[in-house]
Image (cartoon, grey):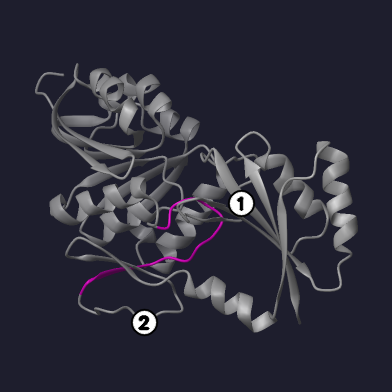
Amino acid sequence: MPWLQLTLEATHSNSEQLSELLSQAGAAAVTLQDALDDPIFEPPPGSTPLWKELFITGLFEADIDSDSVLELIQKNTGQLPVYTLNPLEDQDWIRAWMDDFSPMQFGQRLWICPSWHTPPDMDAVNIILDPGLAFGTGTHPTTSLCLQWLDSHFHDSVEVIDYGCGSGILGVAANLLGATKVYAIDLDPQALMATQANAEKNNVSDKLETFSVNGFKQQHANLQCPVLIANILAAPLIELSSMLSSHVSPGGKIILSGILQEQAEKVSEAYQKYFTIDEITQEGDWIRIVGTKRRGE
C-alpha cells in the first residue's frame, strides 16, 4: 500500500497541538524530530519534546484528502505551518524506519541492538531494545552519557536506583553488567510498562522492579543503594536533590544527566552538600555529573 507523508515545521509551544491534529486527521503514525535528528516515536500521551524547533511528520494512507487535513490544521491553529507532502511506497517507509536504528556501541562492552539486527559482537553486553512508547534508545546524548559511565565504571554486583527510567535502558544495562537488583522509577505509567517489557526481552525481569514515584516513596522511603542514576532534567534534579541524595549509600555514586551546559553549575551546587563532585562530562550541549556520597551525610 502506498503512503503519504505530511511534515510540518513546529515549535515547542505548538508541537503537542499539531501532533494531536495529525492523529485526529487519521495519521497511522506520528513522528517528532529535532534538527539533530534525534527521534521520539509515538511519544507518551501528555508529553512534549524538549526541542525548541522540530519537524512533526504524519503518515497517511495515499488516498487521504490532504487538503482536508491541511484545512483541519489551519482551522484549529489559525495559521497553516510550513509543510511538505511526500509519497512513499509501503516497503520504502518500513525499511527506512528500521534502517534508522542500527546497533550502537557505548564504550568497550555495551551495545544497543534493535531486535531485527544481529548483534555485531556476540561476546559483548548486548541490550535488545526497539524504538517504542518511552524515551530512551541511546541516541540522545543524555542517555549516551549514562551508558558510557556504566560501561566504564560499573563492575560491582550491587543494587541500583534508576530514577526516571524511561524505556528502562539504563536499568537493563546495569542488570546485564552485574547489578543484583534495579529499582526503576518513573512518573509515566507507559514508561514503567516499557521498562518491564524491555527487562523481560533482555531476560533480567527477575532483577528489575518498577515503581511509580509514590509507590517507591511508600515502599522504600529509607532505601539506600551504592549507585543512583537520574537522567531527567535540571529543574527536577535540583528540586529533588535532598531526596535523591538520601537514597545513595555513604561512599556510593550518583550519576546525573539531562543537564544543559548552562545548567551544570546550579545542579552541581545543589548536590555539593552531600557529594564530592568527581567529574563533569560534556557531550554536545549536554552534561553528565558524577559524585561520591560523603561519609556521614
Tell me, for residue 55, which label it has, or none. 1
Q: Main secondary structure of the magenta part?
A: loop
Residue identified by numbered label 2: 118
Say which quadrant the C terminus sits in: top left
Counting from the top left corner in percent of width and height, residue 140 is at 39, 51
Residue 191 belongs to the span the image colors magenta = no
Q: Is residue 102 left or right of residue 45?
A: left
Asked where in the image residue 31 lies, by quadrant, the reply is bottom right
Q: Nearer the viewer, residue 210 or 271?
A: 271
Give the amino acid at mark 1.
Answer: Phe
Identity of the residue drawn at 25% across and 80% down: 122
| SS at mark 2 in the image | loop
Using the numbered discs, state the Cα–Cα distance from disc 1 to disc 2 in whole angstroms.
31 Å
* Residue range (magenta): 124-137
Asked where in the image residue 253 lies, by quadrant, the reply is top left
Q: Which of 223 and 161 is in front in this view?
A: 161
Q: Taking 111 as reference, is 255 above or below it?
A: above
- Mark 1 Cα within 10 Å, few/some/many (few <14, many 20+)? many
Q: Taking 21 as reference, is 291 above or below it?
A: above
- The mark total stands at 2
